Image (cartoon, helix red, strand yellow):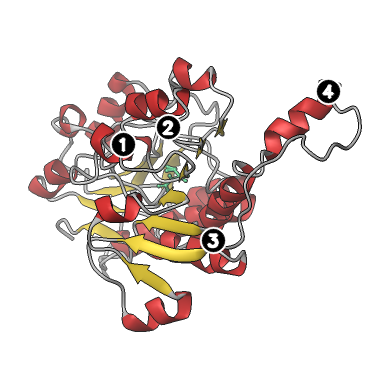
Amino acid sequence: MPTPKKRPLVIVTRKLPDPIETRMMELFDTRLNLADKPMGQAELIEAVKTADVLVPTITDRIDGSILAHAGPNFRLIANFGTGVDHIDLAGARQRGITVTNTPGVLTEDTADMTMALILAVPRRLVEGANALREGKFEGWSPTWMLGQRIWGKRLGIIGMGRIGQAVARRAKAFGLSIHYHNRKRVHESIEQELEATYWESLDQMLARMDIISVNCPHTPATFHLLSARRLDLIPPHAYIVNTARGEVIDENALVRKLRKGEIAGAGLDVFEHEPAVNPKLLELNNVLLIPHMGSATLEGRIDMGEKVIINIKTFADGHAPPDRVIAGLL
Ligand code: 8YV
């Protein structure tokens, strides 16, 4: 009779929703982080030395200096999240370590949050709510708290993947015309459904939009994609929304533009040096800043956890996990 396989040692770096932790404990030899204190470098090194599987999040930098300590059993990084820019993918590939993520399940939540920012910034939603709380509401006025109309404007989406398309679907219903820039043009049927116009040149698109939404991943190719030069192309009446990654925008250059009124406003869910927020951004009142909440729904986080479990379980059973970003050795 074959000897039953040993349960993999899974180290989870942050507190996950209860049902996910319970299920992980049932299936694997799981070490949780109930205190939810982000792990330091030394703890991460210890984890990859001893574990079979690591479940990190965006708050863990799994770079070469960590992977260099990977023990002989360390074979899978099952990331809790879709973006994998905090993981040294080349290093993982080189060492035969598989990397998985959680695509798809946070698309709609992130698109909702993007749409919320698209509406909230031009319509001054938070500014109005704050003014009311501060006792500044002295009755309706024909000229107070005027924002910009959404209906009929042009939305330029940078990155037309799952989230970009989900944003486009919502935006279309709000009367925005859809424009996009992507590495590759999307299928004709999607363009037709969204009535979307493809711009091969990002520069040309930026110069003609009323609202710009960043929905592409952060990769070496998209770092500071919205550089100072490109931000200069954006017309002064336009708004920028970013629910993807802070690194895609040159944040200092954005601050300068916003400060001078050369860009009308910004809705930012992500920041270049997260969790630090550029103090210069905090001084501006034409920005709405929220703390990386794009996927923050209970349902979404449970679905993400389910994906992590499925990826680990299939891998431990000797199969190719469904959400492989890097296919290591099985
Ligand atoms: C995740 C995200 O919640 O999935 C992503 O890429 O940006 C977030 O919404 C976070 O990354 C968790 O690791």
User: What's under tag 4, amino acid-wise?
Assistant: Lys
Which of marks 3 and 4 precedes in the sequence? Answer: 3
Residue displayed at 47% across by 51% down? 210
Q: Is any atom of residue 273 visible in this view?
A: no
Residue 324 against residue 187 in the figure, above or below: above
Q: Could you classify mark 3 by the number of other residues whose Cα lies within 10 Å: few (under 14), some (14-19), or many (20 or more)? A: some
Residue displayed at 21% across by 32% down? 63
In the rendered structure, are the residues bearing label 1 and label 2 in contact, judged by CB atoms less than 8 Å apart?
yes
Q: Which is closer to the viewer, label 4 or label 3?
A: 4
Helix, strand or loop under label 2: loop
- The circle drawn on residue 262 is 2
Residue 125 against residue 192 in the figure, above or below: above
Helix, strand or loop under label 3: helix
User: What's under tag 2, amino acid-wise?
Assistant: Glu
Q: What residue sits right under mark 1 in the picture? A: 232
Q: Position of residue 198 (x, y in %)?
A: 31, 68
